[in-house]
Image (cartoon, rainbow, N blue to C red):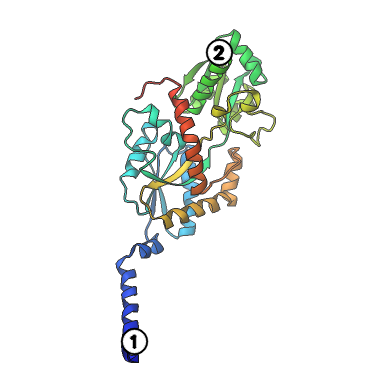
């Protein structure tokens, strides 16, 4: 083959490669992502922790990716409406979702016709711990520990607030009743504010909720923290033992309630891995660390591999615990 022919061949091959990139081979598209704004669908209303996480982590992603990241709140049906919308979105990395663990676990039990399949319709990108839940005993009980609260509940009618039927708080009450032969009545609220107001007013003997909301009652002297969830104590409440330390079944008391970032199934793996790495990087940023500290949350975002491991190990336990509540599916 002459030198001229070889030269023409190489030039032709180079042109073909350039055209393949320009016309959109899968590899080329993955390399140029993102080339336009990204939308994060937040499954819960503005102002809550999920929304705060979505906006804060979204800002960090925007800075690193060089594209706007817009948060759209789509609340309703404990995240099912948002999940259905994201499921139907193109899996191109431009529509993502912030939600909570219950959308992937308890919703299987709580809803008759779930508009999505948690196992098949999403790709898991990153999970973020929601922190310990805190069990606060009303000052009217005189309880300074979980044991003392259990003894109080054996003798008197006891109402304990939760932030919703089927929640982790509801599961913890059910486990206390089962394990210690109690008849604590779970009182379900739509969120936490009204629950803590009722505890402070003496209408509840206890309540289980998030650290920042619980602290208002604790600091006022209306209640005392007697237990926290997870496998380790809350760094802001180092003297408060975990439920497991005080004898409650760890299968329920150490479950990790998390916030998550996911996208429609079928997203390019390169995009998933890049977003996963950026979420971990964002979690270690000074701004995110300050927010986590203010909320009493010890652990920042973890990547897609750790998230999948958490999902696989704990989802069956969440589902089992939810079934044990005997709730009628909606």
* Element under disc 2: loop
Cα distance between the residues tagged 2 and 1: 86 Å
Task: Identify which residue is drawn at 33% across, 33% down.
Answer: 114
**Numbered badge on residue 34:** none
Instruction: State the residue position of label 2.
Output: 182
Mark 2: few/some/many CA within 10 Å (<14, 14-19, 20+) = some
Mark 1: few/some/many CA within 10 Å (<14, 14-19, 20+) = few
Quadrant for residue 251, please give it.
Answer: top right
Task: Identify which residue is drawn at 46% across, 36% down.
Answer: 101
Picture quarter with the C terminus: top left
Task: Identify which residue is drawn at 55% across, 9% down.
Answer: 157
**Residue 96: x and y, percent?**
39, 48
**In the image, is 16 to the left or to the right of 297?**
left
**Residue 82: x and y, percent?**
36, 40
**Numbered badge on residue 6:** 1
Upstream in sequence: badge 2 or badge 1: 1
1 w.r.t. 235: above or below? below
* Element under disc 1: helix
Q: Residue furthest front?
A: 1
Q: Nearer the viewer, residue 178 or 211?
A: 178
**In the image, is 234 to the left or to the right of 196?**
right
Quadrant for residue 87, please give it.
Answer: top left
Q: Nearer the viewer, residue 129 or 247?
A: 247
| Residue 170 appears in the figure | yes
Task: Identify which residue is drawn at 51% across, 40% down.
Answer: 310
Picture quarter with the N terminus: bottom left
**In the image, is 242 to the left or to the right of 261?**
right
Depth check, mark 2 against mark 1: the one in front is: 1
**Residue 311: x and y, percent?**
48, 39
């Amino acid at each position: 083959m002459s030198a001229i022919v070889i030269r023409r061949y190489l030039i032709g091959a180079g042109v073909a490669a350039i055209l393949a990139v320009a016309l959109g081979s899968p590899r080329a598209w993955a390399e140029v992502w993102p080339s336009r704004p990204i939308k994060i669908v937040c499954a819960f209303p503005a102002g809550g922790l999920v929304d705060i996480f979505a906006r804060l982590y979204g800002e960090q992603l925007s800075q690193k990716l060089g594209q706007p990241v817009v948060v759209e709140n789509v609340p309703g049906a404990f995240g099912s409406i948002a999940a259905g919308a994201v499921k139907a979105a193109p899996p191109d990395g431009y529509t993502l979702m912030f939600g909570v663990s219950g959308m992937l676990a308890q919703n299987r039990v709580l809803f008759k016709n779930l508009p999505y399949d948690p196992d098949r319709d999403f790709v898991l990108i990153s999970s973020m711990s929601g922190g310990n839940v805190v069990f606060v005993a009303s000052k009217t009980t005189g309880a300074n520990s979980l044991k003392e609260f259990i003894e109080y509940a054996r003798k008197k009618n006891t109402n304990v607030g939760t932030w919703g039927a089927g929640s982790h708080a509801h599961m913890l009450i059910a486990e206390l009743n089962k394990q210690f032969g109690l008849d604590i009545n779970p009182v379900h609220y739509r969120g936490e504010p009204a629950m803590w107001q009722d505890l402070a007013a003496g209408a509840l003997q206890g309540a289980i909720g998030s650290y920042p909301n619980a602290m208002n009652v604790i600091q006022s002297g209306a209640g005392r923290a007697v237990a926290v969830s997870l496998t380790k104590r809350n760094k802001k409440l180092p003297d408060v033992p975990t439920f497991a330390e005080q004898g409650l079944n760890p299968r329920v008391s150490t479950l990790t309630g998390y916030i998550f970032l996911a996208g429609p199934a079928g997203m390019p793996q390169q995009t998933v891995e890049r977003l996963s790495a950026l979420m971990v990087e964002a979690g270690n940023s000074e701004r995110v660390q300050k927010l986590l500290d203010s909320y009493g949350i010890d652990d920042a975002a973890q990547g897609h591999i750790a998230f999948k491991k958490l999902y696989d190990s704990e989802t069956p336990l969440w589902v089992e615990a939810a079934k044990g509540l005997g709730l009628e599916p909606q």
